[in-house]
Image: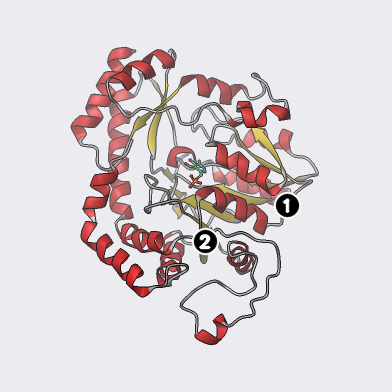
């Protein structure tokens, strides 16, 4: 699914120097690399602000918390995501409400939103699944018409574009993961939140740092870092690690290059597989970034087993769908609640699609799949 060693070796010298610099500086928590990376990431994402947090999960969770979402509220999302998407909603105390997906893009079906709306709905949480942007225009319009915020789960979509604009500045807040293997990845758990709102930026800065009033940066002038530090609400210890930020800065500079290679591989898969299997279709005018290349095939279990046994890095991301997962049984969803999502779950097969694959490896994966159909 990914080649972490090749990825490290590509920038090894720069990474070693940057890590050493952090260790020698002694500023291990919220050191200067964090703020520098936040500024660079915000610029890249075409947003005014970016906040480094502990994971993609905490990015979604803190984004919802910054909006004041909690018990009594409802957040509408999809069930064909990684479980943290839904759990982030549940962790706020709000109720997660799942809508069905569009069968071509595998993303939130905007037509399903009206039936899911209730007086308690506060936000929409679309997911850009596998790096393919959701159809944001009708989603944003629906949010606007109904006074809802939009938090985007872009855990897999750093660098993707929708109608010319980077994912990161479309909704109210956008949540990214920087875990190893993601589009832009560090060396451990990490995440980013981007927003154009100064108020939300200040709120997030506080929430990730125990709810303190003063920003946590270690490079602030000495007198602003003086104690006592007022704590204005119950917050979290969920900051981006400085070592991670130092590595992320290096990899951000080469992100577009890796995304270009991912797109080339996805194109090759499309050419080789078109007509034989169901393909994920990005919306018009969207530029996907392809964390994996996910196809739909009947008799998926047999083919997955066979490819897996051949040593191919196929995966079933993400099964079971969130609404049928054990931690949500108490909500009473059963098979049949979300027909498109469930049909997708029966047929999905994620093929490897990463920048260190060679053309012949891509062909080998496609040939193996075609031979098994
Ligand atoms: C779609 C999606 N959302 C959220 C997350 C959570 O991100 P993290 O693992 O960094 O907490 C993931 C993780 O892979 C994901 O794939």
Question: Is residue 133 left or right of 22 when viewed as pictured?
Answer: right
Mark 1 neighbour class, 10 Å CA radius: few under 14, some 14 to 19, many 20 or more: few
User: Where residue 239 is drawn, which disc sits there?
Assistant: 2
SS type, badge 2: loop
Give x and y (percent) for residue 253.
31, 60
User: Where residue 147 is drawn, which disc sits there?
Assistant: 1
Q: Nearer the viewer, residue 57 or 279?
A: 57
Q: Residue shown at 44%/33% (left/top)?
A: 281
Which colouring convention does the figure follow? secondary structure
Q: Residue shown at 52%/61% (left/top)?
A: 239
* Image quadrant in which the N terminus is located: top left
Q: Nearer the viewer, residue 306 or 268?
A: 306
In the depicted structure, whether residue 210 falls above or below residue 94: below
Give x and y (percent) for residue 196.
56, 64
Q: Is mark 2 within 8 Å of ligand 1?
A: no
Give x and y (percent) for residue 49.
52, 66
SS type, badge 1: loop
Please identify the quarter of the rendering in which residue 315 is found. top left
């Amino acid at each position: 699914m990914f080649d972490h060693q090749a990825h490290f070796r590509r920038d090894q010298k720069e990474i070693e120097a940057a890590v050493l610099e952090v260790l020698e500086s002694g500023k291990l928590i919220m050191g200067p690399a964090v703020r520098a990376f936040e500024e660079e990431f915000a610029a890249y994402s075409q947003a005014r602000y970016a906040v480094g947090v502990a994971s993609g999960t905490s990015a979604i969770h803190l984004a919802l918390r910054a909006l004041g979402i909690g018990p009594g509220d409802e957040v509408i999302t999809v069930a064909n995501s990684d479980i943290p998407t839904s759990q982030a909603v549940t962790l706020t105390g709000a109720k997660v409400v799942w809508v069905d997906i569009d069968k071509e893009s595998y993303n939130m079906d905007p037509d399903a939103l009206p039936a899911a709306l209730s007086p308690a709905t506060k936000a929409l949480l679309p997911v850009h699944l596998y790096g393919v942007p959701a159809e944001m225009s009708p989603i944003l319009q629906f949010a606007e018409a109904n006074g809802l915020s939009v938090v985007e789960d872009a855990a897999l979509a750093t660098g993707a574009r929708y109608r010319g604009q980077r994912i990161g500045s479309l909704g109210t807040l956008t949540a990214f993961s920087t875990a190893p293997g993601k589009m832009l990845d560090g060396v451990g758990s990490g995440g980013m939140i981007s927003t154009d709102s100064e108020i939300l930026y200040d709120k997030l800065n506080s929430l990730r740092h125990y709810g303190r009033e003063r920003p946590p940066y270690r490079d602030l002038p000495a007198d602003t870092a003086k104690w006592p530090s007022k704590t204005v609400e119950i917050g979290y210890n969920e900051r981006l690690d400085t070592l991670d930020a130092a590595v992320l800065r290096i990899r951000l500079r080469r992100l577009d290059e890796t995304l270009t290679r991912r797109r080339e591989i996805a194109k090759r898969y499309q050419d080789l597989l078109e007509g034989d299997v169901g393909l994920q279709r990005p919306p018009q005018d969207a530029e996907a970034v392809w964390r994996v290349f996910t196809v739909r095939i009947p008799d998926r279990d047999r083919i997955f087993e066979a490819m897996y046994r051949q040593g191919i890095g196929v995966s079933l991301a993400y099964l079971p769908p969130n609404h049928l997962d054990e931690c949500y049984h108490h909500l009473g969803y059963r098979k049949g609640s979300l027909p498109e999502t469930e049909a997708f779950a029966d047929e999905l097969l994620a093929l490897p699609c990463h920048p260190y694959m060679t053309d012949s490896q891509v062909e080998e994966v496609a040939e193996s799949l075609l031979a098994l159909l």
